[in-house]
């Protein structure tokens, strides 16, 4: 029973980790909370749905379209809104407020075009489970975890081993210095938004497969934000650690204590960790300079 | 005199003005972003509603009870979280807002849970709402022009420097936070006694986000800007009610547009006063005059 809940938690937690890693990448570069990130995931889920129901394309192609579409919407959001705010040298909170406006816009755009109803993809993935030593593993859960582990390992290699990753790390450590040294910072920011959008699109489709598709499904990103703070803002490994921790804890609280109190326990965990480590588990300690 | 629809709108504006004034003190003047203010509003609403219905307390007493509970919880939350920086603080307050909602739903024997709490006496009349909103703004305006207000601004502009000249920044952050919680609790009490029926969903994270958006759109460090933007942003969706589902779409786009076009908000760092208007007009005249000279 205990192990079963841990496995369930890992499945949900891996989706949190996927959303949180994109959010954390953007935070590490620009230092703002991208409130529209969850809504990008929602847009991805809807692109797959529309491609599947109206376009009658095979599901794998619908998923590819969703991931590409979410990446493009994410990149566009930077080109239309955030870049101009950066160029104005406005405080960082304006980026956050613009993201909130964008979040409201995207949700209501879907609401008026597709409608507020709950939708599903139908039986795309067989609802079967594999029994393994007393634990039942859903095919979908296994698939989710597998895809996400591959995606996160690929992200790690991309950031750690490639020239692109070096540029991103340089820009996140000091944007002005990086641009002086010849890193095209605006290009890197755009590519990071694309990458974060791709991950969000993936997460959106996976969430749609597991639960439902509806205009406010992006609010699950709140959990991903909390995961980032628990792990340390701007740290991608921290975001993954935070996501998995919160997923497992939610499953355990839901299974053994009360599903109604899940969010209260998540909050208690958040406060407890921040009291001990004010910058999260793996976050850098920020000190204000005079 | 006024139709009941118009009266309802004015009462709604007044309630929002009170809540936004609290957020304006915190965000506009102290520079702290909180996403828990809808949570404090929920506390004020539920405590005052339960006091009115279950304990048959007079309206004023139940309002004060709501404000006090919001203040006490705000003080406790502030102690725990005000040492955190930037987005860490923001997410902590966001989590608080979520927890308030979850707990109200969980203790459904007392609060009615997700089904809501009904039969609250309709005590918030037009005149009460207007007088209390004007009073709240006046209190906040006085506070800003006092020594406390200047210390709030010092915390916002240069926290380290403020600390260096001997301002106990934690204490002033704490004070601003508790004050904003009290304004929110007050607005919540009036809200409950106007709608007569409350559900936890009314006080969700979106409500907190709307308060913050209102303050930023109005312009930071401008109480009058917050009030103007609150009136406009509350009435705007009502004017477009016939467009039904499109109104929130326009609302979202308008927020993005305002941030892009006028980053300092409607009235950033200025207060609406006769002096300010005179100065603006003189500046405008000067600008056109210099243009004429050029051509």
Image (cartoon, grey):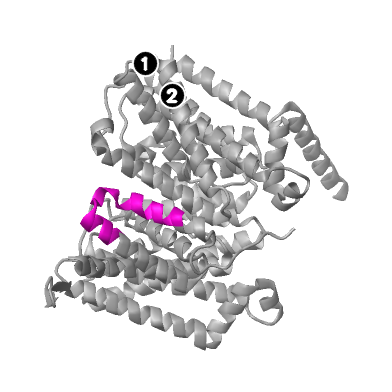
Question: Which residue corresponds to mark 2?
Answer: B65
Whichever of labels 1 and 2 marks the residue nearer the N terminus, that label is 1
Give the image location of residue B131, x and y in percent.
53, 17
Asked if labels 2 and 1 touch by Cβ distance under 8 angstroms, the answer is yes
| Whether residue A53 is visible | no
Give the image quarter of residue A142: bottom left
A190 or A80, which lies in front? A190
The spot of residue B186 in percent (x, y) is 47, 27
The numbered disc on residue A185 is: none
State the residue position of label 1.
Answer: B57
| A116 displayed left or right of B37 | left
Give the residue furthest to the front.
Answer: A276
Pick the front one: B237 or B21: B21
Find the magenta span and give its range.
A250-272
Instruction: Residue B91: give x, y in percent of width and height.
Output: 47, 53
Q: Is residue A264 magenta?
A: yes
Disc 1 is placed on an element classified as: loop
The alpha-carbon separation of the residues under discs 1 and 2 comes to 10 Å
Q: Which residue lies furthest to the top in this view?
A: B1
Side of A78 where B199 appears, left or right: left
Main SS, magenta region, reads helix
Residue A45 appears in the rendering: yes
- Mark 1 vs mark 2: same chain? yes
């Amino acid at each position: 029973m205990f192990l079963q809940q841990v496995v369930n938690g890992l499945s949900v937690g891996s989706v949190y980790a996927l959303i949180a890693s994109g959010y954390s990448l953007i935070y590490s570069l620009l230092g703002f909370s991208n409130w529209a990130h969850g809504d990008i995931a929602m847009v991805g889920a809807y692109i797959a749905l529309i491609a599947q129901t109206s376009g009658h394309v095979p599901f794998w192609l619908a998923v590819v379209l969703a991931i590409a579409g979410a990446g493009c919407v994410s990149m566009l959001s930077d080109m239309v809104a955030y870049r101009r705010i950066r160029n104005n040298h406005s405080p960082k909170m304006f980026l956050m407020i613009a993201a909130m406006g964008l979040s409201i816009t995207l949700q209501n755009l879907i609401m008026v075009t597709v409608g507020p109803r709950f939708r599903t993809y139908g039986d795309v993935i067989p609802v079967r489970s594999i029994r393994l030593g007393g634990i039942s593993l859903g095919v979908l859960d296994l698939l989710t975890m597998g895809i996400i582990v591959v995606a996160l390992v690929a992200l790690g290699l991309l950031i750690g081993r490639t020239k692109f990753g070096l540029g991103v790390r340089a820009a996140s450590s000091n944007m002005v210095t990086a641009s002086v040294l010849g890193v095209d910072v605006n290009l890197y920011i755009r590519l990071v938004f694309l990458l974060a959008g791709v991950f969000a699109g993936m997460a959106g489709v996976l969430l749609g497969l597991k639960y439902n598709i509806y205009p406010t499904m992006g609010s699950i990103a709140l959990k991903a934000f909390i995961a980032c703070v628990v792990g340390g803002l701007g740290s991608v490994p921290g975001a993954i650690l935070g996501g998995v921790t919160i997923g497992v804890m939610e499953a355990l609280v839901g299974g053994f204590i009360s599903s109604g109190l899940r969010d209260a326990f998540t909050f208690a965990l958040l406060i407890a960790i921040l009291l001990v480590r004010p910058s999260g588990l793996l976050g850098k300690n920020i000190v204000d300079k005079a | 005199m006024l139709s009941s629809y118009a009266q309802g709108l004015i009462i709604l504006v007044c309630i929002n003005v009170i809540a936004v004034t609290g957020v304006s003190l915190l965000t506009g003047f102290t520079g702290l972003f909180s996403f828990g203010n809808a949570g404090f509003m929920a506390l004020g609403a539920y405590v005052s509603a339960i006091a009115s219905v279950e304990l048959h307390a007079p309206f004023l007493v139940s309002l004060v009870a709501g404000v006090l509970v919001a203040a006490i919880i705000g003080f406790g939350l502030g102690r725990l979280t005000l040492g955190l920086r930037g987005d860490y603080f923001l997410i902590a307050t966001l989590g608080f807002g979520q927890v308030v909602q979850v707990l109200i739903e969980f203790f459904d024997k007392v609060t009615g849970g997700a089904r809501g709490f009904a039969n609250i006496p309709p005590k918030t009349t037009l005149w009460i709402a207007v007088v209390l909103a004007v009073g709240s703004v006046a209190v906040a305006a006085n506070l800003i022009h006092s020594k406390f207000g200047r210390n709030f601004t010092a915390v916002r502009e240069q926290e380290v420097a403020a600390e260096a000249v001997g301002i106990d920044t934690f204490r002033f952050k704490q004070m601003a936070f508790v004050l904003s919680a009290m304004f929110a609790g007050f607005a919540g009490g009036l809200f409950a006694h106007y709608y007569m029926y409350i559900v936890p969903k009314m006080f969700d994270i979106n409500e907190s986000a709307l308060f913050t958006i209102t303050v930023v759109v109005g312009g930071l460090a401008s109480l009058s800007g917050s009030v103007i933007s609150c009136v406009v942003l509350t009435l705007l969706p009502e004017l477009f009610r016939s467009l039904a589902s499109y109104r929130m779409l326009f609302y979202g786009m308008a927020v993005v547009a305002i941030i892009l076009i006028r980053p300092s908000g409607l009235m950033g760092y200025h207060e609406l006063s006769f002096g300010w208007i005179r100065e603006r007009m003189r500046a405008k005249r000067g600008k056109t005059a210099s243009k004429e000279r050029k051509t």
